[in-house]
């Protein structure tokens, strides 16, 4: 029985590790876009997300990418966790 518990904990740690890596990668890509976009001709100086308007720079786009991916992917992981808890044999 303890081996099943150890595998289960290992799986959760793996999902959290992959989730963290994907969010960090989204932040890096966002920073790269924020670095390249202002150098383009006719590029806007500000961007918006709903009621929030922010200046286009690497830090803002890194935060934008990381927060969006974290929220969307986090919601999907929570949904998957809820379904797996409800139907453990599926």
Image (tube, helix red, strand yellow):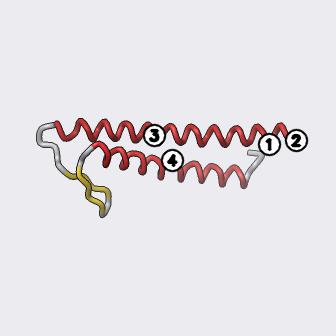
Using residue 6 as the reference point, say whether residue 34 is left or right of it.
Answer: left
Look at discs 3 and 2 and give the one toward the viewer.
Answer: 3
Q: Given contact means CB atoms under 8 Å apart, are the residues at marks 2 and 1 in contact?
A: yes
Q: CA distance from mark 4 to mark 3?
A: 13 Å
Instruction: Give how far apart the Cα atoms at labels 1 and 3 are.
Output: 29 Å
Q: Dividing the image into 4 quarters, which one contains the N terminus?
A: top right
Residue contact at pointers 4 and 3, CB within 8 angstroms: no
- SS at badge 3: helix
- Of circles 4 and 2, the one toward us is 2
- Identify the residue shown where x is 31% and y is 56%: 49
Farthest residue, direction bottom: 51
Query: Quick one: label 4, few (<14), some, or many (20+) residues within 10 Å?
Result: some
Counting residues from the start of the chain, the first of labels 4 and 3 encountered is 3
Neighbor class of circle 3 (other Cα within 10 Å; few <14, some 14-19, many 20+) is some
Q: Pointer 1: what residue?
A: 5
Residue occupied by mark 3: 24
Tag 4–tag 2 contact (CB < 8 Å): no
Q: Is residue 61 left or right of residue 76?
A: left
In the picture of the structure, the residue carrying the numbered disc 2 is 1
Q: Name the residue at 42% across, 51% down.
A: 67
In the rendered image, the residue lying farthest to the left is 42
- Real-space Cα distance between discs 2 and 1? 7 Å
Q: Earlier in the sequence, mark 1 or mark 3?
A: 1
Q: Which residue position holds label 4?
A: 73
Quarter of the image with the C terminus in it: top right
């Amino acid at each position: 029985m303890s081996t099943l518990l150890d595998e289960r904990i290992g799986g959760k740690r793996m999902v959290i590790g992959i989730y963290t890596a994907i969010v960090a990668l989204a932040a890096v890509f966002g920073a790269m876009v924020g670095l390249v976009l202002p150098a383009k001709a006719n590029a806007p100086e500000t961007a918006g997300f709903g009621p929030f308007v922010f200046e286009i720079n690497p830090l803002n786009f890194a935060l934008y990418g990381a927060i969006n991916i974290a929220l969307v992917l986090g919601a999907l992981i929570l949904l998957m966790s809820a379904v797996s808890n409800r139907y453990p044999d599926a």
